[in-house]
């Protein structure tokens, strides 16, 4: 994040939830409970240090109860807690319903919905004091309120895959979905549900979904520029196969005729898809960034983690099921509007990657 900011980018950092606790309820043992609560507080402190913009309280984030989250919301004034369908017993919103961020003159609206599948046991253990309204009904209402006020509308969906497929067709007007609470490993790149692009980071922050939006026209669909690069690569392979088959068919035309027909149809299909993509006004690039040792650590955060471990040492032997594993915060989705390039060392010649090609195509089309 520091590298992006030094390059002049102003990313919108979003966490889709299930970040604070590993389990649905905090371990009742006093020592482990203290350790888990301290770990959750540490993660929120790290979020504040990293400049996180939006946080969606997910199912596991309620492990310590509603009062814990409400208290942390008050303490972390720079971090917006977002959930449009979480209300108290009097149907008053617990957190912010929506948030509008402006970058490079583009107004980006965010709202979040949370799954209703808390589970009876988990909800009872987490305590009463809140209700989860129907995500589809709330999303439809929120889109109607927010759409006229923004250029780009993004839904953060803390729901499972089945719920998302039911939800999206009922709330037209969403430009992009940031998907959380899906334990399945994210597919490479983006996907689509009901014609809407869906972006998902890897479970527990193993990879960050780094998206850069290229906005040109309000109301137009967003498409993944990486798909265009992949299609062009596929087209090159198909054309090479056609030329190779033509050479071989000189000796036995009948043997290769059907394959040539299939390849010709593949070529036509790819060309049609490329034609449709090139006519698209709004696009985005997406890079899945591994949070490995190549990412430079923040010295202040490292010291915060060391202090936590010193105050809450692990007991020897087998780790209990409820023992938290302290890690760097898993900021899942840095979102940029017209973002910058990745920094490289002096004199280093950066390799040309598919992501570079996608961004070059976007810049050339301005």
Image: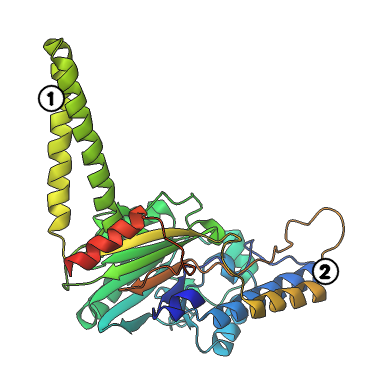
Q: Which quadrant holds residue 233?
A: top left
Q: Are marks 2 and 1 in contact (CB under 8 Å)?
A: no
Q: Is residue 334 left or right of residue 291?
A: left
Of pointers 2 and 1, the one earlier in the residue sequence: 1
Task: Give the class, few, some or many, for how many residues have Cα within 10 Å of label 2's Cα (few <14, many ≥20).
Answer: few
Task: Say above or below: 24 vs 303.
Answer: above
Task: Determine the CA span between mark 2 and mark 1.
Answer: 67 Å
Q: How many marks?
A: 2
Question: For the point 46% across and 63% down, which residue is it?
Answer: 348
Q: Nearer the viewer, residue 138 or 129?
A: 138
Q: Nearer the viewer, residue 276 or 175?
A: 276
Question: For the point 29% across and 69% down, which residue is it?
Answer: 213
Residue 170 in view in this figure: no
* SS at circle 2: loop
Question: For the point 54% across and 79% down, which residue is it?
Answer: 50
Residue 259 image offset from top left, x and y in percent: 18, 21
Task: Say above or below: 332 vs 51.
Answer: above
**Outermost residue, front direction?**
347
Q: Which mark is residue 219?
A: none
Q: Which mark is residue 261?
A: 1
The residue labelled by disc 2 is: 313
Task: Say above or below: 49 vs 287.
Answer: below
Q: Is residue 317 left or right of residue 103?
A: right
Image quarter where the C terminus lies is bottom left
Question: For the point 12% across and 13% down, which residue is it?
Answer: 253
Task: Give the class, few, some or many, for how many residues have Cα within 10 Å of label 1's Cα (few <14, many ≥20).
Answer: few
Q: Nearer the viewer, residue 197 or 169?
A: 197
Residue 78 image offset from top left, x and y in percent: 50, 87
Q: Nearer the viewer, mark 2 or mark 1?
A: 1
**Outermost residue, right direction?**
316
């Amino acid at each position: 994040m520091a590298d992006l900011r030094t390059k002049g980018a102003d990313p919108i950092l979003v966490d889709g939830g299930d970040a604070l606790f590993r389990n649905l309820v905090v371990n009742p043992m006093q020592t482990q409970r203290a350790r888990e609560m301290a770990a959750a507080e540490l993660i929120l402190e790290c979020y504040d240090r990293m400049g996180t913009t939006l946080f969606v309280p997910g199912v596991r984030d309620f492990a310590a109860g509603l009062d814990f989250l409400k208290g942390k919301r008050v303490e972390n004034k720079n971090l917006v807690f977002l959930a449009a369908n979480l209300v108290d017993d009097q149907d008053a919103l617990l957190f912010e319903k929506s948030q509008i961020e402006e970058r490079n003159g583009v107004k980006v609206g965010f709202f979040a919905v949370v799954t209703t599948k808390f589970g009876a046991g988990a909800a009872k253990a987490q305590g009463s004091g809140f209700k989860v309204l129907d995500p589809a009904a709330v999303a439809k209402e929120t889109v109607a309120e927010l759409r006229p006020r923004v250029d780009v509308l993004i839904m953060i969906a803390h729901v499972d895959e089945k719920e998302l497929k039911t939800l999206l067709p009922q709330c037209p007007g969403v430009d992009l979905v940031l998907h959380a609470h899906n334990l399945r490993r994210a597919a490479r790149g983006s996907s689509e549900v009901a014609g809407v692009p869906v972006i998902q980071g890897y479970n527990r922050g193993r990879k960050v979904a780094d998206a850069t939006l290229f906005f040109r026209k309000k109301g137009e669909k967003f498409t993944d520029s990486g798909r265009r690069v992949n299609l062009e690569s596929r087209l090159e392979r198909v054309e090479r196969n056609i030329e190779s088959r033509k050479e071989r068919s000189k000796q036995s035309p009948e043997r290769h005729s059907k394959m040539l027909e299939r390849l010709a149809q593949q070529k036509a299909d790819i060309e049609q898809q490329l034609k449709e993509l090139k006519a698209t006004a709004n696009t985005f690039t997406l890079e899945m960034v591994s949070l490995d040792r190549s990412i430079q650590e923040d010295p202040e955060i490292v010291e915060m983690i060391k202090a936590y471990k010193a105050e809450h040492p692990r007991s020897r032997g087998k780790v209990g099921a409820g023992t938290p594993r302290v890690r760097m915060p898993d900021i899942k989705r840095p979102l940029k509007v017209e973002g910058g390039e990745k920094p490289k060392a002096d004199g280093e010649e950066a390799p040309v990657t598919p992501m570079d090609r996608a961004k070059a195509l976007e810049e050339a089309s301005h």
